[in-house]
Image: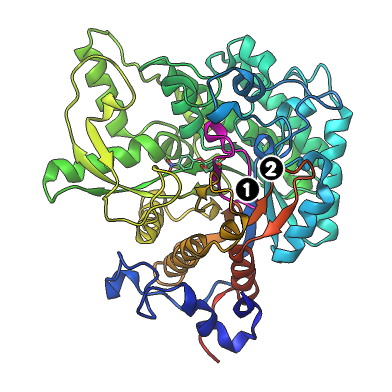
Amino acid sequence: MESATTVKSDTQSWIKPFLADSDRFVYDQFTDPTRDSLMRGKFPPTFAWGVATAAYQIEGAWDEDGKGPSIWDVYSHKEGNVYQNHNGDVACDSYHKIDEDVKMLKELKVSHYRFSLSWARILPDGTVKTVNQSGLTYYRNLIDRLLEANIQPMVTLYHWDLPQALQDAGGWENDTTIVHFNNYADLCFRELGDKVKLWITFNEPYEFIREGYETGCLAPGLEHQGTTVYRVAHNVIKAHAKAWHTYSNTYRERQNGYVGITLVSNWPIPASDSKTDIEATERFLQFMLGWFAHPILVNGDYPEIMKQDVLRKSREQGLTSSRLPTFSKNEKTLTKGTADFLGLNYYTTRRVRHAASPALPAGYMEDQDLKYWHDQDWPTSGASWLRPVPWGFRKLLHWIKERYGNPPLYITENGYCDSGADADKERQLSDNDRVKYYISHISELLKACRLDGVDVRGYMAWSLMDNFEWSDGYSYRFGLYHVDFDDQNRPRTAKTSAKVYSRIIQDNGFPEME
Ligand code: PNW
C-alpha cells in the first residue's frame, strides 16, 4: 500500500489498483458510462470527514464502575440469541483504550468521530435517580482527548442499548420511557453539551424497532407481529421530538449545537416498468424512511401511503381502527421540524416488486404488499443483506433532497463487511473489496453534492474498527482497523482501507491530476 502515501499529484495512479479493468469503473458489474464513471473533484472546504462506532459494539466493561445492564447485555447473555453466543462483555475494550482509539483517529486525520453513549453506563437503572459519575468521566475523558486532537465529537444518545431496568417496565412500549429518555438527554446536554455540538437522538429506529419487536433478531428479541412496532415507533418519534425541544428550550442559545436523528434506508428499484412495481418502490421508501422522516421533517404525521395501507389492512383483519397510531394536533405541531440535520445510513439497494399479502397474519412487511431481494449479479460482501450498489446511494440522496426540501445531511454510516470467520489476518488487512466500496460510494456522494446540489455536510465511515456486529457477533468485520479478538489486548491494525480513506480525507475527495 505504498501508493496510499504517494504525493498528491498521483491521485489518479493510487486509485488504479482498486478499479476494474477500465480506469473509470470500480465494479465489473457496473459499467454504464453515464451512471458508473468515477467522479473526480473535491468536497466543500468545510466538509466533515469521520468514522462511526457505537457503545455496545466497542466498549466492553459491561458491568464495570457502576454501569447497569442494558437490554444487549441481557439479550447476548441468553444462549442462542447471538452467533456462537458471542457478546459485548469485552468487545474492543474501548472503555480502557481511549489512547488507542484516539491514536487511530489521529492517524486517519478525521475531523469528526461519531460514537454513542451507553445510557446504562451513565444512568444504571435508566432514570436520573442515580447518576454514575464514572460513566460521565469516561465520556468526558474521551471528548477532551478528541478536542485536544482537533476532532469534533458527534454523539449518538441511543444506539440500541436501552437500560434493562426500563425494559423490565415495558421499554419503548411504555410511554414513560419517553420521559426517561428526555431526562437522560437533558443530563447529557447539561453535562457534555459545552463540548459537543452535534447530537443524534436515535440511531436507526427502523432497524431496532423492526428487529427488536417483530422479528426478534435484535434485543429485546420480541416477536410481536403487526401492532407493537407501530406503537414503539410512535413513542420513539415522540421521545426524539421531546429531546429536541429540551435542547432548543434550554441549551441551544448557550451551547450553539445541532440535534438530529439518524435514519437508515435502502434504495429500492422496481422489478419491472409496471405501474404496480413502481408504486411498490414508493411504498418501500415510505415504510422504511418516511415512517420517521415524514413526521419529523414534513408535517408531524406519517406518510399518507402508510396511513392508507395500514388502515386498509387493519379493516380487512376485522379491526375497527388502524394498527398505526395517530398523532394529535398538538403532537403533530411538537414533532414537525424537530431535526437540525438528518443523519443517513446507507448500505445497499434492493429490487422490489408488488406482491399482495393475505389479510392475515398482520405484520409490518405484510402491510406493504411487496417483496424485495438483491440481483444475483450484484457484487457481494460477507453479509447476505449487503451488496454494494453505489449508484443507489446517489439516487437515494436525490430522492431525499426532492422529498424533504434538501435538509442538511450527514452520512452517519456507510461501509462494507467481510467475513470475520476468515482467521487469516494478512488477508483481512489487504481489504481491497472494502476499498472499492469506499471509493465508489464516496464518488457517488461527490456527484450528489456537486452535480445534484444535495446539501451534504459530512461522511462517517462505518466503522473505525472491527466490532461486535449485533446478532452476528464477531463473524462480520466492518472495520478500517482490524481488531484481534483472540488477543486479550485487542490490538488494532490498520487495513489497506484505513490508509486509502485517510488519503481521500487529506485530498478532500478525488482531486484531478495536477
Ligand atoms: C447499522 N440495512 O445497521 C447499525 O447502525 C450498526 O450498528 C451496524 O453495525 C451496521 O449498520 C452494520 O450492520 C444496519 O437494512 C441495519 O441496509 C440495516 C441495514 C443497514 C445497517
Q: Are marks 2 and 1 in contact (CB under 8 Å)?
A: yes
* Residue 290 vertical position relative to residue 408 in the rendered view, above or below: above
Residue 21 locus on image (x, y percent): 36, 77
**Figure quadrant of residue 494:** bottom right
Q: Residue at x 79, y 45 (%)?
A: 489
Q: Quadrant of residue 152?
A: bottom right
Disc count in the image?
2
Residue type at the position of mark 1:
Asp
Magenta span: predominant SS is: loop
Residue 265 shows in the view: yes
Residue behind mark 1: 466
Q: Which mark lies nearer to you, 2 or 1? A: 2
Q: Which residue is mark 2?
A: 485
User: Disc 2, ligand 1: is the CB inside 8 Å?
Assistant: no
The quarter in which the N terminus is drawn is: bottom right
Q: Is residue 458 magenta?
A: no
Q: Which mark is residue 167?
A: none
Residue 126 appears left or right of 466: right
Q: How would you rate the neighbour count of disc 1 (Cα within 10 Å): few for under 14, some for 14-19, many for 20 or more?
A: many
* Label 2 crowd (10 A; few <14 / some 14-19 / many >=20): some
Label 1 element class: loop
Residue 94 on image: x %, y %: 77, 42
The front one of 423 and 209 is 423
Q: Residue 413, relative to residue 312: is it above or below?
A: below
Q: Residue at x 38, y 31 (%)?
A: 302
In the image, the segment drawn in magenta is 462-478
Q: Position of residue 247 (x, y in %)?
A: 69, 38
